[in-house]
């Protein structure tokens, strides 16, 4: 992956310009440190841009069986690349091992890598599924993401509480509706 760098000075300049463009005084007491705060926030929120998920998924453990593994309710926060507003929710990852499993925290770290980028929910779902398939050589994976998008809640259509679900099924899950249904039922528990 290309090494990227967050340019905090450019962000501070841009935020100052936005503050001025909306008719505010960038030197007003409540706003004078806002450009710096936003630059530091963006550094954290977009920290996944320099990360490679395979680093987290490289530590595995040998297993003899190929029983379903389900890690559900992994909380995440991301930024919609269309409006740079947050979207947030839960990721559920189910996979069928092929001789190895990842530590459970590594699945959550994988979600974080992809969530901490300018993102689309559909792409986030796909990237997590691809990373599990590729790095664990899983027999199959199913990733379900449920999220609320502030670009829908606080602007535009203004429908707070609405939720978007995306699903990616690969390998053994791809054409097996019974297996997909089983995972969806387990997620509800």
Image (tube, grey):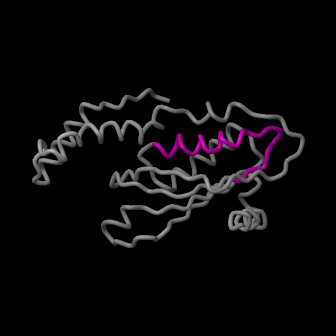
Q: Which residue lies furthest to the right in this view?
A: 64
Closest to the observer: 12 or 172? 12
Q: Residue at x 36, y 54 (%)?
A: 85
User: Horizontally, is 100 left or right of 135 in the view?
Assistant: right
User: Horizontally, is 187 left or right of 115 in the view?
Assistant: right
Instruction: Let me know if residue 100 is in the magenta part.
Output: yes
Q: Looking at the image, how many numbered discs can be counted on the residues?
A: 0
Q: Which residue is drawn at 44% across and 56% down?
A: 87
Residue 166 on image: x %, y %:
56, 61
Q: Give the quarter of the figure containing the C terminus.
A: bottom right
Q: Quadrant of residue 110?
A: top right
Instruction: Let me know if residue 110 is in the magenta part.
Output: yes
Q: Which residue is drawn at 45% across and 70% down?
A: 161
User: Horizontally, is 117 left or right of 155 in the view?
Assistant: right
The residues colored magenta run 94-116
Residue 180 on image: x %, y %:
73, 63
Q: Residue at x 37, y 28 (%)?
A: 5
Closest to the observer: 39 or 117? 39
Residue 67 on image: x %, y %:
84, 51
Q: In this view, does 29 lie above or below 1?
A: below
Q: Which residue lies furthest to the top in this view?
A: 3
User: Horizontally, is 35 left or right of 139 in the view?
Assistant: left
Closest to the observer: 75 or 53? 75
Residue 115 on image: x %, y %:
50, 46
């Amino acid at each position: 992956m290309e090494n990227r760098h967050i340019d905090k000075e450019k962000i501070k300049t841009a935020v100052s310009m936005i503050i001025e463009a909306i008719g505010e005084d960038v030197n007003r007491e409540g706003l004078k440190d806002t450009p710096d705060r936003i630059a530091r926030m963006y550094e954290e929120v977009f920290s996944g841009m320099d990360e490679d998920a395979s680093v987290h998924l490289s530590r595995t453990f040998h297993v003899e069986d190929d029983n379903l593994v389900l890690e559900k309710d992994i909380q995440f926060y991301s930024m919609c690349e269309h409006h740079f507003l947050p979207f947030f929710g839960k990721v559920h990852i189910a996979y069928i091992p092929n001789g190895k499993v990842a530590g459970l925290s590594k699945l959550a770290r994988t979600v974080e890598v992809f969530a901490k980028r300018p993102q689309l929910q559909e792409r986030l779902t796909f990237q997590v599924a691809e990373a599990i398939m590729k790095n664990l050589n899983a027999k199959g994976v199913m990733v379900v993401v449920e999220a609320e998008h502030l670009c829908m809640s606080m602007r535009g259509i203004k429908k707070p509480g609405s939720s978007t679900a995306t699903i990616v099924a690969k390998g053994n899950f791809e054409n097996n509706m019974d297996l997909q249904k089983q995972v969806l039922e387990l997620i509800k528990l």
